[in-house]
Image (tube, helix red, strand yellow):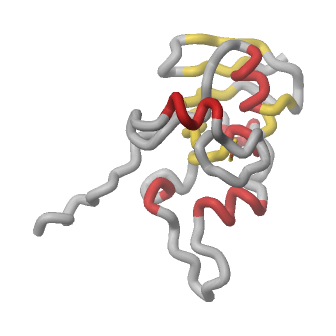
């Protein structure tokens, strides 16, 4: 059975093949519906889309074992990239994490993975004040 390692929470759990990452985290007492840069996590823990891939508050980084998860879903693409434009622009949280950012509620676990919850969003960029 696949093992999911939550880096920030320092916890490892064993899950069934194809299990939903957010649901398994919730069973283990881990809240993946976090706020932005530590703000709003108590709010998002209660007020979220209940795993429908709509609110984007369950962003995680799958730092190891991305190949052991399902393909990025259309809902994730809609959350992470600006839709309906010819050349989609990535949303701020997605920039720099294009290869490993997922929505936990849309992620199926098919093998061992390492997960970082609530990744920081670089709100100002490197050249904001220049
Ligand atoms: S819980 Fe809302 S996007 Fe995952």
Which of the 4 image quarters holds residue 76? bottom right
- Looking at the rendered image, the quarter that the C terminus falls into is bottom left
- Looking at the rendered image, the quarter that the N terminus falls into is top right
Report how many numbered discs are placed on residues in the image.
Answer: 0
Please name whichever residue, 96 or 112, is drawn nearer the observer in this view of the structure: 96
Against 56, residue 79 (above or below) is: below
* Ligand 1 quadrant assignment: top right
96 sits left or right of 122 in the view: right
Which of the 4 image quarters holds residue 114? top right
User: Measured from the top left, where is residue 40 in percent x and y?
Assistant: 46, 37
Against 16, residue 33 (above or below) is: below
User: Measured from the top left, where is residue 26 in percent x and y?
Assistant: 72, 21
User: Measured from the top left, where is residue 105 in percent x and y?
Assistant: 74, 40
Q: Residue furthest bottom?
A: 86
Against 95, residue 3 (above or below) is: above
Q: Residue furthest left?
A: 130
Which of the 4 image quarters holds residue 66? top right
48 sits left or right of 92 in the view: right
Residue beneath the point at 59% across and 44% down: 57
Please name whichever residue, 41 or 121, is drawn nearer the observer in this view of the structure: 41
Residue beneath the point at 66% across and 45% down: 103
Residue beneath the point at 57% across and 46% down: 100
Residue beneath the point at 50% across and 32% down: 41
């Amino acid at each position: 059975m696949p093992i999911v390692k939550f880096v920030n929470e320092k916890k490892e759990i064993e899950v069934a093949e194809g299990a939903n990452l957010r649901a398994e985290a919730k069973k283990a007492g881990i809240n993946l519906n976090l706020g932005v840069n530590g703000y709003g996590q108590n709010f998002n823990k209660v007020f979220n889309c209940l795993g429908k891939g709509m609110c984007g508050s369950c962003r995680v980084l799958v730092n190891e074992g991305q190949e052991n998860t399902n393909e990025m879903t259309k809902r994730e693409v809609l959350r992470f990239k600006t839709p309906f434009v010819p050349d989609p622009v990535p949303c701020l949280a997605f920039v720099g994490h294009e290869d490993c950012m997922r929505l936990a509620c849309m992620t199926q676990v098919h093998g061992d993975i390492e997960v970082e919850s609530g990744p920081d969003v670089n709100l100002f960029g490197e050249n904001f004040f220049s």
